[in-house]
């Protein structure tokens, strides 16, 4: 019998909780026979939502939690003090091995703190990066770090590249993915101190197809399959892309409805436009994984619908099936062995 993948879901996290979260969990169970969901949150509210649906009751379990971490709360204090919150309890389900993965649309800060403090890092990982899929003219790229480590060291960014390459190739299906570092120019001597120090390390790193600098304007054009940066730069790139995509869509819609002729053109091109704009729907890709932790942790947007929750659960199943964490650990062990061999030779 195929293994059952157990996913802890923060039922109280996000703007549309628990309605959309519960709906997404029900949809996931209906579509994926190998998943079991642990809905963490206030039991009366969760049961009220579940009563709206028919579902396999053996594969959705409620874990009652009396507290909720709100978005505006200081993350460290919230995680430390609210032990009975839906997010913290879900984190402990992963830490204790009762669940394979976690999905939340709740507080990003608390999610990042809990990932580091409760679930913990894979041995050898300096800093777990938050990663996300971004649509490009060539398909998709994988951006990391987009929110977890604003002051990462060069060696940590090299690990981002290594983990990103593993995820892109095995999970996203991009063969021999190219890796680029966000920079202000294509030349190797360009950039701030961090980029200049990281660049040669990426050139020397084994197992990644490093192609050099990737300017911000090249990111949406698919300049690299895996794009790495510390979280400050990565988050700016991501938010700029999100804002520009939203602005362009609004401008296109306004232009297409400005005159009678343009409305006719819009009607004729509606199907093609809908297909094109769908590529910008990030909910179809699932959530943003926090790579390098002892278990998969996935963060979805605060305004996530049931579609994003459902697809994030599917993401957890695929991630576990492909043993992405196992491949990351194997990569780290291989690097350690090479370093030991090099040290022995030098002696």
Image (cartoon, rainbow, N blue to C red):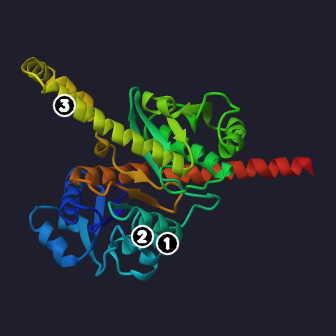
Total marks in image: 3
Task: Looking at the picture, tell me which residue is in the foreground, 83 or 56.
Answer: 83
Q: Residue at x 31, y 75 (%)?
A: 68
Q: Earlier in the sequence, mark 3 or mark 2?
A: 2
Q: Residue at x 55, y 47 (%)?
A: 163
Please give the label number shown on residue 150.
none
| Circle 2: element type | helix
Q: Which residue is mark 1?
A: 118
Task: Looking at the picture, tell me which residue is in the foreground, 323 or 129.
Answer: 129
* Residue 294: x %, y % from top left: 51, 63
Q: Residue at x 28, y 64 (%)?
A: 37
Give the crowd class for mark 1: few <14, some 14-19, many >=20 residues within 10 Å.
many
Q: Which residue is mark 2?
A: 91
Depicted 322 relative to depicted 113: above or below: above
Instruction: Please name which of the two marks, 1 or 3, marks the residue nearer to the observer.
Output: 3
CB under 8 Å between discs 1 and 2: yes
* Residue 160: x %, y % from top left: 57, 48
Q: Which residue is mark 3?
A: 253
């Amino acid at each position: 019998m195929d293994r059952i993948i157990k996913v802890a879901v923060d039922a109280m996290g996000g703007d549309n909780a628990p309605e959309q979260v519960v709906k997404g969990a029900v949809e996931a169970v209906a579509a994926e026979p190998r998943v079991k969901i642990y809905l963490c949150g206030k039991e009366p509210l969760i049961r009220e939502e579940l009563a709206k649906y028919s579902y396999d009751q053996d594969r959705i379990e409620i874990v009652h939690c009396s507290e909720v971490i709100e978005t505006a709360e200081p993350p460290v204090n919230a995680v430390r003090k609210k032990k009975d919150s839906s997010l913290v309890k879900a984190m402990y389900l992963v830490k204790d091995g009762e669940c394979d993965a976690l999905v939340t649309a709740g507080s990003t800060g608390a999610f990042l703190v809990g990932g580091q403090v409760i679930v913990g890092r894979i041995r050898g990982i300096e800093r777990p990066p938050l990663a996300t899929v971004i649509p490009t003219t060539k398909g998709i790229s994988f951006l990391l770090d987009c929110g977890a480590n604003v002051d990462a060291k060069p060696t940590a960014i090299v690990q981002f590249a290594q983990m990103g390459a593993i995820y892109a190739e095995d999970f996203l299906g991009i063969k021999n993915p190219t890796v680029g570092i966000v920079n202000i120019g294509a030349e190797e001597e360009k950039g701030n101190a961090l980029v200049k120090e990281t660049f040669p390390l990426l050139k020397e790193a084994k197992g990644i197809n490093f192609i050099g600098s990737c300017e911000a304007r090249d990111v949406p054009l698919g300049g690299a399959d895996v794009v790495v940066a510390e979280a400050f730069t990565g988050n700016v790139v991501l938010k700029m892309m999100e804002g520009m995509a939203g602005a362009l869509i609004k401008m296109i819609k306004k232009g297409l409805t400005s005159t009678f002729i343009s409305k006719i053109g819009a009607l004729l091109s509606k199907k093609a436009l809908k297909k094109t704009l769908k590529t910008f729907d990030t909910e179809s890709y699932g959530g943003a994984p926090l790579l390098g932790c002892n278990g998969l942790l996935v963060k979805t947007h605060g305004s996530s619908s049931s579609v994003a929750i459902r697809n994030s659960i599917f993401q957890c199943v695929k991630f576990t099936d492909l043993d992405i964490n196992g491949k990351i650990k194997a990569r780290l062990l291989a690097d350690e062995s090479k370093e030991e061999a090099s040290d022995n030779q030098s002696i």
